[in-house]
Structures are given as structure tokens and as C-alpha cells.
Amino acid sequence: MSSAESEGIEYRLSEGVKPPGKVIALLNQKGGAGKTTLATHLAGEFAMQGQRVTLLDADPQGSALDWAQRRAQSGQDRLYGVFGLARDSLHQEAPLIALQADFVVIDGPPRVAALARSALLAADLVLIPVQPSAYDVWASQEMVQLIAEARVFRPQLRAAFVINRRVVGTVIGRESRAALADQPFPALQAEVSQRIVFADSVAAGRLAFEVAPSCAAAREIAALAQAVREMLL
Ligand SMILES: Nc1ncnc2c1ncn2[C@@H]1O[C@H](COP(=O)(O)OP(=O)(O)O)[C@@H](O)[C@H]1O
Ligand SMILES: [Mg+2]
């Protein structure tokens, strides 16, 4: 047996004992909260760190799939696999996909529906992106309720708010802090600011840190990924 073959066997054996990857769902019934932006960037950050990542697009609109298609059309490397799975059977499929991955990131659907419930059954961690306004925190209450219900059956399910689109140079206001403090889940310290590069990179099928590797957006995503890893320990 050649050394390459024996290495292959060793690889398969170590694969066999690997625990399944972690499933992270980006959920908020509000459209435009940043689910797709944070899902594609978190997945990209983990992939750049050498992790095996799969993104499941659970939004029937298929924005992450569109982004991946644009990426392929413009001849860029794949970075991670993106698959459409906007089905109520998500919770049955995601654990199988997690067997082959270190991280499975679910880009959630708008509206609270069977699909969002299915994502909650599959997830180890739910991230709720919210803009730093009390209105946006209040608007996520249906999702908060759904997570609380899911936790009755799955007490290990973790959840956190992620502030997205904070205006650069401002601290988040007292009203939104107060609204967040009333919630049953923490808000991550790692906040993501409103930055043109997040929106601009989409059309080219790219990620903010590919367009500008050492930009502030890249640092924020790296910090968010680190916070997520810590929550999953
Ligand atoms: N931090 C951000 N800075 C700038 N634009 C953002 C940011 N987050 C999201 N966007 C933009 O806002 C729009 C909605 O975001 P998206 O991630 O698609 O939300 P959702 O998936 O929750 O509907 C998109 O055009 C996206 O590019
Ligand atoms: Mg989306």
C-alpha cells in the first residue's frame, strides 16, 4: 500500500470518529435584518479558517443561492457549498449534512412559519440579527417566543441577538439597549456596523473581506465568528 493510500485510510478513520458539525441558524421574521449577509459572511469566515462549511439557504427567495451563482459565474472559487433547502424537512436533513461539515450555517426564511420551526429543531445556536432600534428588537418577539418554546424540548439550544447595521461612530442607543436587556437571550458584544462594502460585494458574488481584506467590516466579521465559536464551546 502506498503512503498516499495509507494516509487516505487514516483520514477516513479519523473522519469516522469526528463529532457532527455545529448548526448555526440565522433567524428573524423581519426581512432585511441581515440574515443572508451574516450567514454568507460567517460561513466565509469559518471556511477561510480551514473549516468545512455548508450553507443551507432556507429562504424560498434563495438570496444566498443567487449570491453563490453569481460567484460561480464570475469565476471565483467556491469557498463553501451553498444548497437550497427551503423545506419543512430541514431538521431531518441538516444533521446529516452536519456529519460532513464542521459548521452548517442556515440562512433563515422571513416570517415565522413551519420552515423557521424546522430550523430551530436543527440548530445548536440561533443568531437573531437586529438593527439597533427598539422597534427592531420588539419586531423579533415572535421569534423569541418560538425559541423559548423550542427550548422546552431542546434545553441545549443556544440563542443570541447580533446587532447589525450599527451606524459607524455611534454607540447603540439607550432605548435599544433597554429593549435588548429585557430579552431572554444575550446580545453578543461583537456588533456589525452599517458598511457599504457588505452591500456592494453582493452583486459581484463576493464577501466584504474578499473585496477589502483588512477593512473594518472584515474585523467585525472575524470578531463575530470568534464570539460564535465561544458560544458553541
Ligand atoms: N451591516 C450592513 N451594512 C450594509 N448593508 C447591509 C448590512 N447588513 C445588511 N445589509 C444590506 O441590507 C439588505 C438586507 O440584508 P439581508 O442580509 O439580505 O437581510 P435578510 O436576509 O434578513 O432579509 C441587503 O441589501 C444587504 O446588503
Ligand atoms: Mg435573506
Image: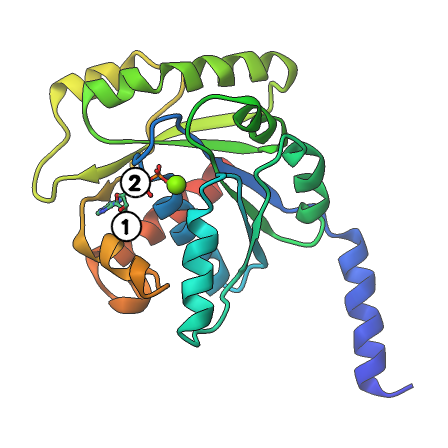
Q: Which residue is mark 2?
A: 190
Q: Is mark 1 within 8 Å of ligand 1?
A: no
Name the spot of residue 189 as percent of width and height, x first. 29, 35
Quarter of the image for residue 33 reads: top left
Q: Which residue is mark 1?
A: 220
**Quarter of image, ligand 2:** top left
Is 82 situated above or below 167? below
Residue pictured at 47% horizontal, 73% vertical: 77
Question: Alpha-carbon distance for marks 2 and 1?
Answer: 7 Å
Residue, far left: 169
What's the mark number on residue 58?
A: none
Name the spot of residue 230 as percent of width and height, x first. 46, 40
Q: Is mark 2 within 8 Å of ligand 1?
A: no
Q: Is residue 189 left or right of residue 48?
A: left
Report the colour scheme.
rainbow
Is 138 situated above or below 125? above
Name the spot of residue 8 as percent of width and height, x first. 80, 74
For the residue carrying disc 2, how many other residues have a C-alpha within 10 Å: few (<14), some (14-19), or many (20+)? some
Q: Is residue 123 left or right of residue 220?
A: right
Q: The residue under label 1 is which amino acid type? A: Glu
- Looking at the rendered image, the quarter that the C terminus falls into is top right
Is residue 233 visible to us here?
A: no
Mark 2–mark 1 CB contact (< 8 Å): yes
Quarter of the image for residue 12 reads: bottom right
